[in-house]
Image (spheres, helix red, strand yellow):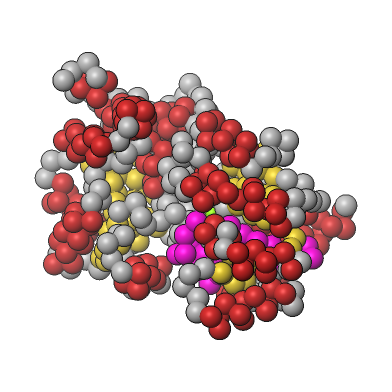
Amino acid sequence: EAAIQQTLKEKLKEIFGFDAFRGEQEVIINNIVSGNNTFVIMPTGAGKSLCYQLPAMVLEGTAIVISPLIALMKNQVDQMTAFGINAQFLNSTLNKSEMTRVKNDVLSGECRLLYIAPESLTKEDNLIFLKKAKLSFIAVDEAHCISEWGHDFRPEYRRIRGIIDDIDPKLPIIALTATATPKVQQDIQKNLNMEESYIFKSSFNRKNLYYEIRPKIDSKKQLIRYIANNKGKSGIIYCLSRKKVEEIASLLTVNGIKALPYHAGLDADTRMKNQDAFLNEESDVIVATIAFGMGIDKPDVRFVIHYDAPKSLEGYYQETGRAGRDGLEGNCLMFYAYDDILKLEKFNKDKTVTERDNARALLMEMVAYSNLGVCRRRQLLSYFGEYSDKDCGFCDNCIKPTKKIKIEDEAVLGLKA
Ligand code: ADP
Ligand code: MG
């Protein structure tokens, strides 16, 4: 036991260059190395990836990492490659010969980590290939994609369990997510048939993030001033629509700020290019819809601005969570206008009654959060089931208290037409 721990710690230093494990990483990694099903719930930036990356280096066979986005796979494969690790991805961007090379690397046992999209996983020839390969375990990253109550539901994620059973029902599974609401958690366990697994859940408090909400008045001027005051720092600005993304990106550019747009309306090449420019610091600011960011690992994002209100507190928490992942300064600013809530409500008009009620309930929580004068952190954490009776002293409501409870809540509550 002691010997294994020594090797894990040595490997941590040798391969990744890190001096110590963070939080519960070591316990989790030991648990996985022992072949147990494991469920890891830790906030963004906590270091979940290492929990499967390191076991993949010590166990025999290739680890399969199921990941929902090509951008996310690329990001991790680039990182692993920089560490000198043979990691590859299998997705629709590969041509035939690249595909063959990847598969050969897996079959020869050279590839330690194979990242794969759930769509590729269900393809017949990939299944045949995976059955031939020697696998160590399956990691389901961003496991909340399984749940309709999560913020990025992906129907294909619900087929993962069946496919694992087809490959080898005894393969250990490690599910990872930063979504901690009890509903999502239950969904994941049920769907992956891992009710009996070990669960590691850590606190969702991001102590270095400063939460602030300003009324959306003169917001363009405020935005430019804010970024000018943070010159040279990395930041993400979230907007509701593609059109708004383009508009704000141009506005910033003409004001001498290095900013690029990112949204699903851009072609894949441009998206990749803009993302890389942001990651490589050629661009300070990325203006984006929520299409940007899941799993993106840029440790030194110094601010996240919600130019428009997000659809849920969960989304808000995830998006602001991309700031200060290195534990240093992280400012989360949101511009709030009730008009934006009404716009979001309009998007729900063609949904079924249940979907609409669900979406409205989520929006309502967002409205309450934006309007209440209560400590922001306490509100956020209680949403994740963490209660505290102490104010944080590090959010706008704690630092500049104002009384603000508004009647406009009534409309969203359904009390007003
Ligand atoms: P998550 O998936 O939980 O959001 P990541 O796995 O992307 O977070 O890790 C966030 C950052 O923390 C990455 O830059 C990673 O290299 C770094 N990291 C992870 N574990 C450690 C550690 N033990 N020591 C130092 N840095 C770490
Ligand atoms: Mg992650």
Query: Which residue shows up at 47% across the image and 24% down it?
Result: 390
Residue 118 shows in the view: yes
Residue 249 x %, y %: 21, 62
Residue 406 shows in the view: no
* Quadrant of image for the C terminus: top left
Query: Which residue shows up at 48% across the image and 47% down it?
Result: 155
Does 267 sit left or right of 74 as displayed? left
Residue 219 x %, y %: 16, 46
Which residue, as the protein is rendered here, is positioned at the far top?
A: 415
User: In this rendering, is residue 47 above or below 11?
Assistant: above
User: In this picture, which residue range is highlighted in magenta?
Assistant: 58-79
Query: Which residue shows up at 77% across the image and 47% down it?
Result: 36
> Where, by quadrant of the figure, is residue 369 drawn?
top left
Residue 252 colored in magenta in the image: no
Taking depth in this image into account, of 17 and 200 the one nearest to the observer is 200
Residue 65 colored in magenta in the image: yes
